[in-house]
Image: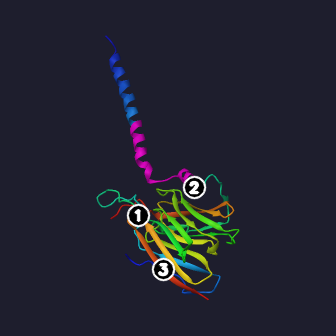
Amino acid sequence: MAKPLIKVPPTAKKGEIIEIKTLIAHPMETGYRAGLNGATLPRDIIRRFVCSLDGEEIFSADFSPAIAANPFLSFFTRIEKSGSITFQWTGDNGFSVSETVEISVS
Amino acid sequence: MSSPISPPCAVERRRFLRQTAECAAGAAVTLLLAIRPARATPEEMRAAIRQTIGPAAPHDGRVLLDLPPLVENGNAVPLTVTVDSPMTGQDHVVAIHLFNEKNPQPYVASFHLGPRAGRAQVSTRIKLADSQQVIAIAQMSDGSFWQGGAKVIVTIAACVEDVN
């Protein structure tokens, strides 16, 4: 499984609003397309994304097949303390990827 | 001498015409049913919105949906939703829901935010199967709903194309 791309500033000032960007490799197969033999390809999507700071949820998203392949997300959060930001993607066929990024707040 | 067309023959003709018409009507209904699942409709989008946000009627405004007006490839359409909100503990955006009119499914995605987000802005990339309207609905902490929309023209459709 390819490592997801995560962009978080390594340091931030207390109370600063930071932008977090994530990109993860996934086909996001809709379940509506016909394959080479004419049979419909089964759905295979990421259903949920959760971002949390030290275990406390700061952002989450529910996806449908209408999210483009290799889902990209950008969102904001106000950062008050240093900690580890955890990103978790879960989806069809037991898909589950988790990443953790450290941020230090001065 | 009787007329060239005898009564039994006329009855046959009448029955034949009636059966042909019935058969054609039946075929048309079957064809409609066969075509139906490829696209949602604006009515289905309204039904999906009701299912997600309940009976509340969203107000227009406060939500800015930024989409390119002309999209070459519907497989990845960049989109940004910005909600006008102070994002404080008392007044913040709880969730942003996205819907479309003509994809196979009208529901696109939900994003859950909180007062800690600081800024109510989310960007992602979506698939669009046709030129259509996309709607973003923001759910506020006071229970009200606000919506914003954008019309997009798509030249290459996504979602239902074949693999090659």
Horizontal and vertical percent position of residue B90:
71, 68
Residue that protrudes farthest toward the top in the picture: B1
Disc 1 secondary structure class: helix
CA separation in Å, label 1 and label 3: 22 Å
Residue drawn at x 40%, y 32% as measured from the top left: B22
Q: Amino acid at mark 1?
A: Asp
Disc 2 is placed on an element classified as: helix
The residue indicated by pointer 2 is B49
Image quadrant occupied by the C terminus of chain B: bottom left
Whole-number angstrom distance, CA of label 3 to CA of label 2: 34 Å
Q: Position of residue B33 (x, y in %)?
A: 42, 45
Q: Which residues are magenta?
A: B25-52
**Amino acid type of the residue tagged 3 in the rendering:** Thr
Q: Identify which residue is drawn at 48% across, 79% down.
A: A100
Q: Which residue is mark 1?
A: A92
Image point 53% across, 67% down: which residue?
A: A61
Asked if one can make out residue B133 in the rendered structure from this viewpoint, the answer is: no
Q: Is residue B143 above or below residue B25?
A: below
Residue A100 circle label:
3
Residue with the most extreme bottom position:
A106
Count neighbours of disc 2 (C-alpha within 10 A) and say few if under 14, some if 14 to 19, many if 20 or more: many
Q: Chain of mark 3?
A: A
Q: Quadrant of residue A55?
A: bottom right
